[in-house]
Amino acid sequence: MPHSLRRGRPPLHKPEKDLGTPELQARRQRGLTLEPLDFCLKHGIISHDEHWAGLHLRWLYTLRFGAPTVRGVEFDKLAAAARSHVEHDDHWKAAREWEYNAAVDALAGCGAKRIVLDVCVFHRFPYFLEVAATLPRAKDALPALRAALRKGSADFQEWEKFREGMKLLAKQWDR
C-alpha cells in the first residue's frame, strides 16, 4: 500500500489565487515546497518502497537523536508528561538503534550516507532535484533527468549514489 504524501493537518480550504510572494509562487509551481523525499516520489525518482524506507530512516534518526528541525516545546508539559511504555523498553530502543546503525553503516559502505541523510532526514534539496523541478512533468522523470545531468559530473554521481542508497535501504528493510 503506497504511503500518502499528505501529512499533517488538512487545509480548511484551498484559495483560488496563490497569495504568496512571487518567489514562493515560483517555488510552488516547480514543486519545491514539498519535502525532498515526497518530491522524489512524485517525480518518479524513487519508488513507493524507497519512499517508505526514507521515512523509516528519518523515524529511526528521530528516535536516536531527536527531531533534526526546529520545533517549539513547552517544557512544563514535556516534563510532566508520562512517557509511553515503548520509550521505557530498553530492548526495543536498543533494537531500533541497532537498526539505525546498520542502515547508516550500509549507506556508508556504498558511499551514499551523506546524500541520503541530507534528503531523507535534513530535507535538503540537492542540485539534481533542482534540475528535476525544471523538467516537464512526467510519470517517470528518470530518462529526462539522466539526459539533463552531464554524465560523469559530480551532480550525476550524487544522483546515482542517492538512487543506489535508496534501493539499498528498501532492500535492507525487505520493501
Image (tube, rainbow, N blue to C red):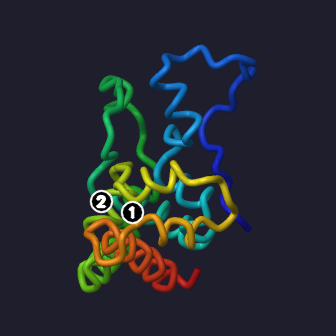
Q: Where is 100 relative to 78, above or below? A: below
Give percent across and percent down for residue 107: 31, 78
Front residue of 160 and 38: 160
Give percent across and percent down for residue 75: 30, 26
Give percent across and percent down for residue 164: 41, 80
99 sits to left or right of 111: right
Q: Quadrant of the N terminus?
A: bottom right
Which numbered dot is residue 105? Answer: none
Residue name at image x 36 percent, y 70 percent: 150
Q: CA distance from mark 2 to mark 1?
A: 6 Å
19 sits to left or right of 81: right
Tag 2 secondary structure: helix
**Residue 71 sits in quarter:** top left
Task: List the residue tagged with mark 1.
Answer: 60
Q: Quadrant of the C terminus?
A: bottom right
Residue name at image x 53 percent, y 59 percent: 40
Front residue of 79 and 135: 135
Front residue of 77 and 128: 128
Q: Where is 92 relative to 123, above or below? A: below
Three-letter amino acid code of the residue under disc 1:
Leu
Which numbered dot is residue 64? Answer: 2
Q: Is residue 101 visible?
A: no
104 sits to left or right of 38: left
Residue name at image x 75 percent, y 20 percent: 13
Three-letter amino acid code of the residue under disc 2:
Arg
- Classify mark 2: residues with Cα within 10 Å, few (<14), some (14-19) or many (20+): some
Q: Is residue 17 visible?
A: yes
The answer to whether marks 2 and 1 mark residues whose Cβ atoms lie closer than 8 Å is yes
Tag 1 secondary structure: helix
